[in-house]
Image (tube, rainbow, N blue to C red):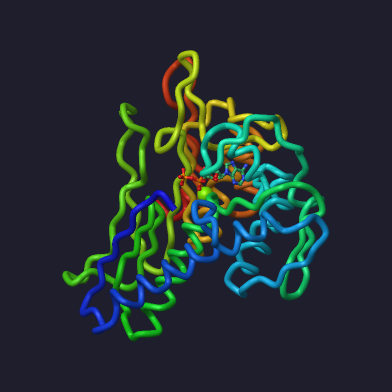
Amino acid sequence: MGTTWSASVVDPPADAEMTIRAKLDMVIAQMSNWDADSVISRFNRQPIGAWMTLPVEMMTVLRTGMDISRLSGGAFDPALGQLVGQWGFGPHVANEAPACGSAATSVEVGDHGARRLADVALDFSGIAKGFAVDAVADALRALGAANFLVEIGGELRGAGVKPDIQPWWVDMETPPGMALPPMRVALSGLAIATSGDYRRFHMAAGKRLSHSIDPGTGAPIQNGVACVTVLHDSAMMADAWATAITVAGPGKGLSLAREHGLAARMIVRTDNGPREHLTPALEMMLA
Ligand code: ADP
Ligand code: MG
């Protein structure tokens, strides 16, 4: 899905690497928009109104995506695939402005499947990496591994400690060129995800076009947010919230984070340089 992974496993069980690869293959086979035969790609080609049975993992991601969409007032939208394509960030370049409609009204989720109610396309790129990190972590634990750090495209989850009994220390990502003091967190039983405007963006007419799209305007965000980092028990939740808060922006995004007790950091580009905001839950963790 256009990203890389790595894992550090202390005393790795014999089939650790094979198990990790199998989990990642499963996520790609279900949720990659880059693979025309994946379940998500087939779902997106289903006739409008037709139900399709979906694998349990995909149902989990879809339900969580719909929940975060609702909780974020639509800032997160797992059904904005066509907009992503229109702005050139997905596998398909759409030329005409897509029919808009939020996930809340354009996708119906049943017990074992879902259907499109309008011509929208699911895109799990803002949540699937986190889900994959959790899936890999759960699989490693099931094999008996207790101490590891798993990373996919900048989303990480740590369990236990390093061989030297130190926790898995991780520095929060900072946009390149920003002189901010490093912020180090210990990832023991915790996941971290960062959504940023510097990993993937296009330049157009001298302006940075973020790959975070505001479903409200149908265009890349222009709210000054350079990045949002979220710490959470679940990498999937950290990933989705980081995207949601980024899109919701400095005002609404930070109040959402506070309201949901999230440990989050936001860096905003201002005329006077970068401004950093920490939620109370994060400040407590750092204290
Ligand atoms: P990264 O970790 O790479 O910075 P994110 O987790 O924020 O990325 O995911 C960005 C991707 O999510 C985009 O490339 C796009 O496919 C999708 N996306 C963009 N805007 C939204 C949104 N408002 N809600 C859900 N997904 C989005
Ligand atoms: Mg995300």
- Residue 39: image x %, image y %? 59, 64
Q: Which of 14/280 is in front?
A: 14
The quadrant where residue 48 appears: bottom right
Relative to 203, is 215 on the left or the right?
right
Relative to 144, say whether 36 is above or below.
above
Q: Residue at 48% of width from left, 50% of height from top?
A: 282
Asked whether residue 155 is in view, the answer is: yes
Q: Residue at 41% of width from left, 71% of height from top?
A: 136
Asked whether residue 287 is in view, the answer is: no
- Residue 110: image x %, image y %? 78, 70
The quadrant where residue 250 appears: top right
- Residue 137: image x %, image y %? 40, 72
The quadrant where residue 251 appears: top right
Relative to 150, say whether 245 is above or below.
above
Relative to 183, say whether 223 is above or below.
above
Q: Which of 196/209 is in front?
A: 209
Q: Which of 57/280 is in front?
A: 57
Relative to 59, is 242 on the left or the right?
left
Question: How many numbered marks appear?
Answer: 0
* Residue farthest to the left, as pictured: 164
Q: Residue at 23% of width from left, 69% of height from top?
A: 162
Relative to 263, is 157 on the left or the right?
left
- Residue 18: image x %, image y %? 31, 76
Q: In what quadrant does ligand 1 lie?
A: top right
